[in-house]
């Protein structure tokens, strides 16, 4: 649990040396590791009262035998070099390096760190980051970034010294799944935008990006066996813009970029509802082909479209789409949506979901679906994503399926902060920062506890959001708080402490180029 030094403000118990260091560290970065505004908050922080300074002689050492760790070292160098101008190099070594350097290493013995845990030891002679798995090193690097002055996040050279307070952080996640969802269907977002979002969620130790790739307003992923999905179905979006789609090469590029940040991509094709873009591209997927073809849709109503669940061609379509997606998706999950199929009779909906679940499994993947899929018979390997109704999450748990918790009234980043918010909707709630932070996944739904929960997700739907600035304004600063709910143990989290840390973290978000919502609930120190 949290070391006592964590909660102690500067008290007389601290040595004169520590106080001197406080002033030598500059106003920007506290001299005490446990005073750092780390988000998500680590499991334990043990501070000692010295500093380590990065200098022109500092390099990043990695074990001789691991290309993967070398890549992680290079990621660290690429993060730190532009702002510090220190030209740190990644150097393979057989032994711990000389004083003054940083060192990344894997430890076979320390299995308690799990897949993503790490230990970050900062002493006057150097930084040593160890983990049981490479992903742990990557997560630890995010902590190291936050232990440096905020200016380290800038992309051009900054003046100033680069000191890190000494101590040891031992840290690992509470939930295995910590995700964000991006709706690229209502408004299309470019590959560059998606990569930027990946970088932002990676900074808060999230490990999944769920891409909502199809909806009534547009189809966003190339499917070679059904080319009209993109030649026709991608050319629309909310409000009448030109839409867009990812070629398979671009999608693979996104997957690789995410993988390098230890983030899995989860593709979602929403069905049988939310399918107007597919139905308008292929009339044979409609039950009544004679009806005038559905036109491309640019409004924001939901629940009016459905694939024809009684036609065999529908399952050929689903199988082809799932196969092509599965081939490009190294992660274990494919998301089939399943929400708000208001015009699909329940007696058609249930066999449809069961059959899609089989199709997903036949291509070696596990199915995820929103709340409503729990009306069908879920396999224990399938996952239900709770967004609106507790009874669906309870049904998933009863069926032995895991639950991803993303309650609209807490975790939807498209909900407005308050009635003055420029973007967003408020059908579920207005979500100020305290509301987004102050909740606990394992007690949200009676009968759905930590053993049923895979983790949490923060979705952002884009009916009202059509550019990165607006997207980041809605996501920040709620997303770091949601990431903390997924990562940090309940016992170390509280709103007052978070609010203080977040206030100090504002400068860092600015340095990262994030145009965040400056909530009045937080003292941003301006
Ligand atoms: C709902 C709906 C989406 C909307 C979103 C807006 C789910 C799972 N289905 O969430 O189509 O975009 O609300 O907040």
Image (spheres, rainbow, N blue to C red):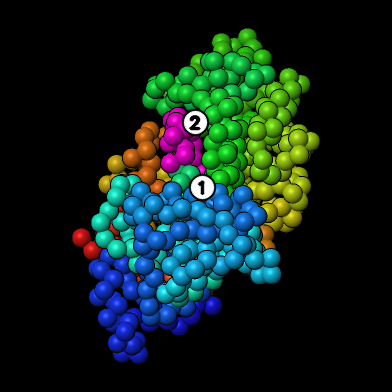
Give the magenta-colored segment's residue range. 181-196
The circle drawn on residue 414 is: none
Confirm whether the magenta stretch covers residue 215: no
Q: Residue at x 31, y 56 (%)?
A: 151
Task: Give the camera-side residue of 209 and 298.
Answer: 209
Q: Given the current orientation, which residue lies at the most extreme bottom position? A: 13
Q: Residue at x 23, y 63 (%)?
A: 525
Answer above or below: position of 5 versus 41: below
Quadrant of the frame with the N terminus: bottom right
Answer above or below: position of 294 versus 337: above
Q: Is residue 317 left or right of residue 23?
A: right
Residue 405 horizontal/vertical position (percent): 57, 54
Give the image quarter of residue 62: bottom right
Q: Is residue 206 left or right of residue 240?
A: right
Q: Is residue 374 left or right of residue 427?
A: right
Q: Residue at x 66, y 14 (%)?
A: 284
Q: Residue at x 66, y 43 (%)?
A: 331
Tell me, yes or no, if residue 150 can be seen here: yes
The circle drawn on residue 185 is: 2
The circle drawn on residue 180 is: 1
């Amino acid at each position: 649990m949290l070391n006592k030094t964590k909660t102690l403000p500067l008290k007389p118990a601290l040595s004169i040396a520590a106080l001197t260091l406080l002033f030598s560290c500059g106003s920007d970065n506290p001299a005490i590791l446990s005073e750092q505004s780390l988000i998500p908050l680590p499991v334990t922080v043990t501070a000692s009262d010295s500093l380590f300074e990065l200098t022109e002689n500092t390099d990043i050492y990695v074990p001789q035998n691991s290309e993967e760790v070398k890549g992680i070292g290079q990621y660290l160098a690429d993060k730190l070099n532009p702002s510090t101008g220190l030209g740190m190099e990644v150097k393979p070594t057989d032994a711990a390096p000389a004083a003054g350097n940083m060192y990344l290493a894997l430890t076979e013995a320390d299995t308690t760190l799990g897949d993503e845990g790490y230990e970050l030891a900062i002493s006057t002679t150097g930084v040593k980051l160890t983990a049981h798995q490479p992903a742990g090193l990557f997560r630890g690097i995010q902590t190291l970034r936050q232990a440096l002055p905020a200016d380290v996040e800038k992309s051009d050279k900054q003046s100033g010294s680069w000191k890190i307070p000494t101590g040891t952080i031992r840290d690992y996640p509470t939930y295995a799944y910590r995700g964000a969802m991006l709706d690229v269907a209502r408004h299309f977002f470019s590959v560059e935008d998606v990569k930027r979002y990946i970088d932002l969620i990676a900074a808060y130790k999230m490990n999944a990006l769920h891409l909502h790739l199809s909806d009534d307003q547009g189809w966003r992923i190339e499917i070679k066996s059904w080319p009209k999905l993109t030649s026709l179905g991608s050319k629309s979006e909310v409000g009448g813009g030109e839409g867009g789609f990812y070629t398979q090469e671009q999608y693979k590029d996104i997957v690789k970029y995410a993988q390098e940040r230890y983030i899995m991509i989860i593709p979602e094709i929403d069905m049988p509802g939310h399918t107007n873009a597919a139905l308008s591209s292929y009339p044979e997927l409609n039950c009544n082909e004679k009806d005038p073809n559905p036109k491309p849709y640019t409004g924001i109503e939901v629940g009016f479209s459905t694939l024809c669940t009684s036609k065999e061609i529908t399952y050929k379509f689903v199988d082809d789409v799932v196969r092509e997606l599965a081939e490009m998706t190294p992660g274990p999950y494919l998301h089939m949506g399943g929400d708000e199929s208001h015009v699909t009779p329940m007696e058609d909906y249930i066999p449809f979901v069961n059959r899609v679940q089989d199709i997903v499994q036949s291509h070696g993947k596990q199915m995820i679906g929103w709340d409503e899929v729990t009306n069908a018979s879920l396999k224990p390997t399938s996952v239900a994503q709770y967004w609106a109704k507790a009874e669906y999450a309870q049904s998933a748990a009863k069926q032995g399926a895991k639950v991803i918790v993303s309650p609209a009234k807490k975790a939807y980043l498209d909900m407005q902060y308050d009635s003055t918010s420029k973007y967003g909707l408020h059908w579920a709630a207005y979500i100020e920062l305290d509301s987004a932070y102050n909740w606990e996944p394992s007690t949200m739904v009676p009968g759905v506890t930590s053993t049923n929960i895979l983790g949490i997700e923060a979705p952002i739907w884009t009916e009202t959001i059509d550019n990165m600035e607006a997207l980041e304004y809605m996501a920040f600063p709620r997303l770091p708080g949601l990431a903390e709910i997924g990562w940090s143990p309940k016992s170390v989290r509280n709103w007052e402490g978070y609010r203080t840390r977040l206030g100090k973290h504002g400068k860092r978000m600015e340095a990262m180029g994030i145009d965040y919502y400056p909530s009045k609930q937080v003292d941003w120190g301006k």
